Image (cartoon, rainbow, N blue to C red):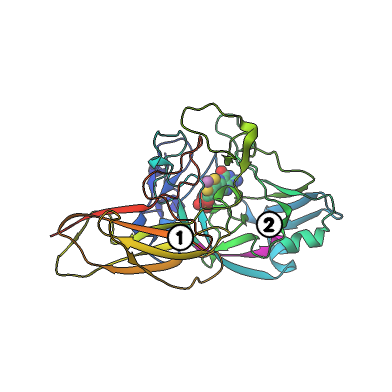
Amino acid sequence: MPHASTDTALAAKTRLRWLDDDAVNGEPPADALDPMLTPAEAFFVRNNGDMPAAIDTGAWRLDVTGEVERPLSLSVAELRESFPVVSVTAVLECAGNGRAFLDPPVSGAQWRDGAVGCARWTGVRMRDLLERAGVKSSAVYTGHHSPDRSLTSPDRPALSRGVPIAKALAPETLVAFAMNDAPLPRLHGGPLRVVVPGYPGSAWQKWIDRLDVRDREHDGEKMTGTDYRLPVQPVRPGEAFDAASFAVITDMPVKSVITRPAAGFLASRDDALTVEGWAWSGATPVAGVRVSADGGVTWTPAALADAADTYAWRRFSAAVSLPSGPVVLIAQARDVAGNVQPLDDAPWNPRGYCNNAVHRVGGRVI
Ligand SMILES: Nc1nc2c(c(=O)[nH]1)N[C@H]1C(S)=C(S)[C@@H](COP(=O)(O)O)O[C@H]1N2
Ligand SMILES: [Mo]
């Protein structure tokens, strides 16, 4: 089990609660997400299978194959030296973040609020790699390949996902080798991972050793059926559905997390309480955040700081006046298209993805 391990990288994950499953999966409490760049000790870990056991960065190669004129094979050093090195600050959120709050419950990793973080990712643009290889006009999608294996069928990959070719060629999409200005930790996909700002975490392939260009939507492990897909038409709990009418998640909904005060806070009636946290979204920018200290009866507009980068999260803060007794703080973000975080009913779907219902933090005023 992860917490019994002597692995120094795991030992450094001091703020994570390890989930009760066979893979290494853990998330921090929301208050550990307070710094703008989520520190290593608080960055969630999500593995679909068995991580690669030993990694030799010196021997690692990234192959570019498929619908390209000139297939490539590069060491990590060659990758760094052959292309401009760029950094992007972006939120990484698992599509299953918030699954634990769905009613009725949905099986899968029971993430609460913490399967999200924001980091500065450094690497090379996937576009530069693909242009060097020469993308053929038949290119439609990428397929990302890694050596981690399924826990139940060790001959199968744990995960092999991809992105539409337009997103692969977008300037924000990277093959990264550093996180928060340190070498990319093995737990986060070192030596090389894909960074796809705005897309769900599943698209951010860790330990990538082959970037395949395909002439159709990728059909790798956990890319088909209902995996990381939402029903095109809403499906009610218990209702029969056809997996053929599910579409790949290529965007993340507007969401926010309260990082101050922490759950279980005690505040004095005489103090003004400032509620702070982060708001983010996928392709549609955040427009604003409001905060309530009375269950959503009255609202205070929050100040919203500029984003450090297009896909970074934005700081919100609001001073609220408090009733005495037990208090539940709520933050609700909206995007420029008018989408708002649901207040009560979490958006239910058969696999429990993209729950962007508001975060609630309980405390007491004395
Ligand atoms: N090779 C590989 N890449 C992977 C995964 C995986 O299981 N194997 N999990 C994905 C999912 S579902 C998420 S949410 C992110 C989590 O990244 P992190 O562990 O660095 O937080 O990695 C993605 N990349
Ligand atoms: Mo995920």
Q: In the rendering, at what x and y percent does residue 203 appear?
A: 61, 49
Q: What is the x, y in percent for residue 277?
A: 37, 63
Which residue is more in the foreground, 235 or 99?
235
Some atom of ligand 2 lies within 8 Å of the CB belonging to the residue at label 1: no
Q: Quadrant of the C terminus?
A: bottom left
Magenta-drawn segment = 119-126
Magenta stretch mostly in which secondary structure? strand
Image quarter hosting the N terminus: top left
Nearest the camera: 283 or 188? 283
Q: Dividing the picture into quarters, in which one does residue 57 lie?
A: bottom right
In terms of secondary structure, where does tag 1 sit? strand
Q: Is residue 53 visible?
A: no
| Badge 2 element | helix
Q: Residue 24 magenta-drawn?
A: no
Q: What label sits on residue 334 in the rendered view?
A: 1
Q: Quadrant of residue 51?
A: top right
User: Seen from this angle, which residue lies furthest right?
Assistant: 69
Q: Is residue 66 left or right of residue 179?
A: right
Residue, disc 2: 167
User: Residue at left 77%, top 52%?
Assistant: 64
Give yes or no for contact between labels 1 and 2 (Cβ–Cβ under 8 Å).
no
User: Separation of disc 1 and disc 2 at Cα?
Assistant: 24 Å
Q: Earlier in the sequence, mark 1 or mark 2?
A: 2
Label 2 beta carbon less than 8 Å to ligand 1: no
- The amino acid pointed to by label 1 is Arg
In the image, what residue type sits under mark 2? Lys
Side (left or right) of 74 relative to 70: left
